[in-house]
Image (cartoon, rainbow, N blue to C red):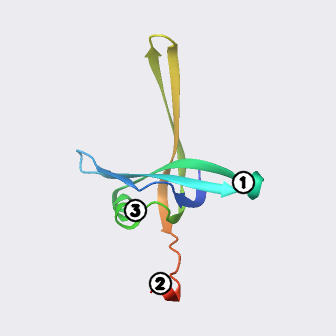
Amino acid sequence: MNKTLLVGRLGQNVQYTKLESGKEVAKLRIATSEGYGDQKITEWHDVECWEFLARQCHEQLKKGDRVAVEGSIRTSTWVEMHPEHGEITHINRRIVAKHIEFLFEKKKKDEL
């Protein structure tokens, strides 16, 4: 089974694109953290979502928002020939989201 669940914050605004085929795709950069103080570790994750979910993310999310992402890991590999370094293999891992829950914080009374 290939299933991933992340809860984190957007590190930048959503990158939204409408392809020539008419399909919509959104790319999110999400930070997750664990531990405290000097032991805190932050990991960055590339997430992509498609169609209606992409449009929702584009319209409702911004840098700093908290989200829960459920999806699966996809890996792409390609080889590039470099004139000085020869053959270079590139690996891209991303999460293709099936569901994203927006975890907006409730506003305090004095912010209303």
Residue at image position (42%, 62%) is: 62
Frontmost of labels 3 and 1 is 1
Q: Are marks 2 and 1 in contact (CB under 8 Å)?
A: no
Tell whether 12 sits left or right of 52: right
Label 2 environment density (alpha carbons within 10 Å; few <14, some 14–19, many ≥20): few
Residue at image position (61%, 55%) is: 32
SS category of the residue bearing label 1: loop
Q: Which mark is residue 111?
A: 2
Where is residue 40? Give x, y as percent.
72, 54
Residue assigned mark 1: 40
Badge 3 amino acid: Cys
Residue assigned mark 3: 57
Residue at image position (24%, 50%) is: 22
SS category of the residue bearing label 2: helix
Mark 2 and mark 3: Cα distance apart in space:
24 Å
Where is residue 71? Give x, y as percent.
53, 55
Where is residue 10? Give x, y as percent.
50, 58
Mark 3 and mark 1: Cα distance apart in space:
28 Å
Q: Are marks 3 and 1 in contact (CB under 8 Å)?
A: no
The answer to whether 78 is drawn above or below residue 94 in the figure is above
Q: Which mark is residue 112?
A: none
Residue at image position (22%, 44%) is: 20
For residue 12, what is the image quadrant? bottom left
Q: Earlier in the sequence, mark 2 or mark 3?
A: 3
Quadrant showing the C terminus: bottom left
Badge 1 amino acid: Lys
